[in-house]
Image: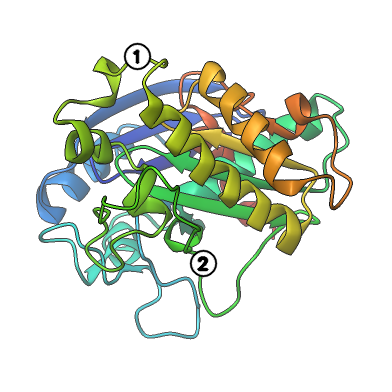
């Protein structure tokens, strides 16, 4: 059996074909340009294979409610040209197979959840944050995604400002200094005039970022009480998470019990940003079986 995965990012698409054991058989990636060009490239790729189901994890916001006339759409995205794109509709025109439609971070969260289960780690709930060009999070509780009216937008929560960062207005076009506006990758250029890869971890800006990311972890802890919080994306590294854990410990002040922080606040188990692809495979198989 072959199933397909589309990890639709705002910068690039990753398309892959795998089997029922979630093993990648083939993959391709290409830049996210216009909807017409990008979706056609995905269609052309999958026409080479006899897939039985397709999992799609897309940048958003997207419409997840199946009773909505815009189910399967990318909706109010700030990405130029992609607002109100009928993603699922275009795929359905070309492939008569079951499709699972969710957000990119939900796909990653599900991939991490499945891999934890396969490795006999006792995980019933998990939250996955990506911190890169933007910030988003997917949440799973008892094997199900959190959110009914729509998917969570945990990258746009509001935070207590760091006393050394009060003059920075943030970069979110909607909220200014929400979580995304304060810690997404482009904030390095906005603050320092250079990309994050050129900023050494000894720079105080990383302490400021860790303060904000730790607050996100505290919000998640106190509201959802997950077994695990995973941080992925281009901004995140293990040395950065050491700073986040230290800030988390200080800010939480032992208010509630959490697991050992090295197991609770972690990098992805799946390497090379493969969490969404594995999650898509698993969701495609699930959709086929339902």
Residue 9: name its quadrant: top left
Give residue 143's position: percent from left, percent from top.
76, 53
Given residues 236 and 56, the one toward you in this image is 236
| C-alpha span from label 2 to label 1 | 35 Å
- Asked which quadrant contains residue 149, the reply is bottom right
C-beta proximity under 8 Å, tags 2 and 1 = no
Q: Residue at x 43, y 54 (%)?
A: 179
Instruction: Work out which quarter of the rendered image holds the N terminus and state it.
Output: top right
Q: Residues within 10 Å of mark 2 (few under 14, many from 20)?
A: many
Describe the element under mark 2 as helix, strand or loop: loop
In the image, residue 2 sits, relative to residue 94, either above or below, namely above
- Foreground disc of the pair 2, 1: 1
Describe residue 19's horizontal placement relative to residue 116 as left or right.
left
Looking at the image, the residue that sits furthest to the front is 163
Which residue sits at x=10%, y=61%? 81
Residue 285 in sight from this viewpoint: no
User: Disc 2 designates what residue?
Assistant: 151
Residue 84: x and y in percent read 22, 72
**Label 1: element kind:** loop
Up-down relation of residue 141 to residue 214 (above or below) = below
Q: Nearer the viewer, residue 18 or 86?
A: 86
Q: Left or right: 5 with respect to 170?
A: right
Q: Position of residue 112 (x, y in %)?
A: 65, 35
Q: Circle 1: is it few (<14), some (14-19), or many (20+) Cα within 10 Å?
A: few
- Residue carrying label 1: 200
Which residue is found at the position 11% from the left and 54% from the top? 36
Q: How is the image coloured?
A: rainbow
Question: 88 above or below 134?
Answer: below
Observer-nearest of 111 and 200:
200
Q: Quadrant of the C terminus?
A: bottom right
């Amino acid at each position: 059996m072959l199933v397909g995965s589309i990890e639709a990012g705002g910068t690039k698409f990753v398309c892959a074909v795998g089997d029922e054991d979630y093993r990648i058989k083939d993959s391709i990636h290409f830049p996210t340009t216009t909807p017409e060009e990008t979706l056609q490239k995905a269609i052309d790729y999958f026409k080479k294979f006899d897939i039985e189901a397709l999992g799609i994890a897309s940048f958003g916001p997207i419409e997840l409610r199946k009773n909505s006339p815009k189910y399967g759409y990318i909706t109010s995205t700030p990405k130029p040209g992609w607002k109100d794109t009928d993603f699922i509709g275009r795929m359905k025109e070309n492939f008569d197979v079951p499709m699972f439609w969710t957000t990119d971070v939900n796909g990653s969260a599900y991939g991490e959840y499945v891999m934890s289960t396969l490795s006999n780690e006792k995980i019933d709930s998990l939250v996955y944050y990506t911190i890169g060009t933007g910030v988003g999070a997917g949440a799973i509780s008892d094997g199900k995604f959190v959110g009914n009216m729509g998917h969570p937008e945990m990258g746009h929560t509001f935070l207590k400002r760091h006393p050394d960062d009060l003059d920075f207005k943030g970069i979110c076009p909607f909220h200014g200094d929400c979580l995304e506006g304060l810690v997404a990758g482009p904030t390095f250029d906005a603050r320092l005039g250079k990309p994050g890869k050129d900023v050494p971890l000894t720079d105080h800006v990383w302490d400021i970022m860790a303060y904000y990311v730790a607050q996100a972890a505290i919000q998640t802890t106190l509201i959802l009480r997950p077994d695990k919080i995973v941080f992925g994306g281009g901004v995140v590294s293990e040395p950065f998470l050491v700073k986040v854990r230290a800030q988390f410990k200080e800010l939480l002040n032992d208010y509630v019990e959490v697991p050992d922080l090295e197991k609770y606040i972690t990098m992805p188990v799946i390497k090379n940003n493969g969490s969404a692809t594995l999650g898509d495979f698993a969701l495609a198989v699930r959709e086929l079986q339902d």
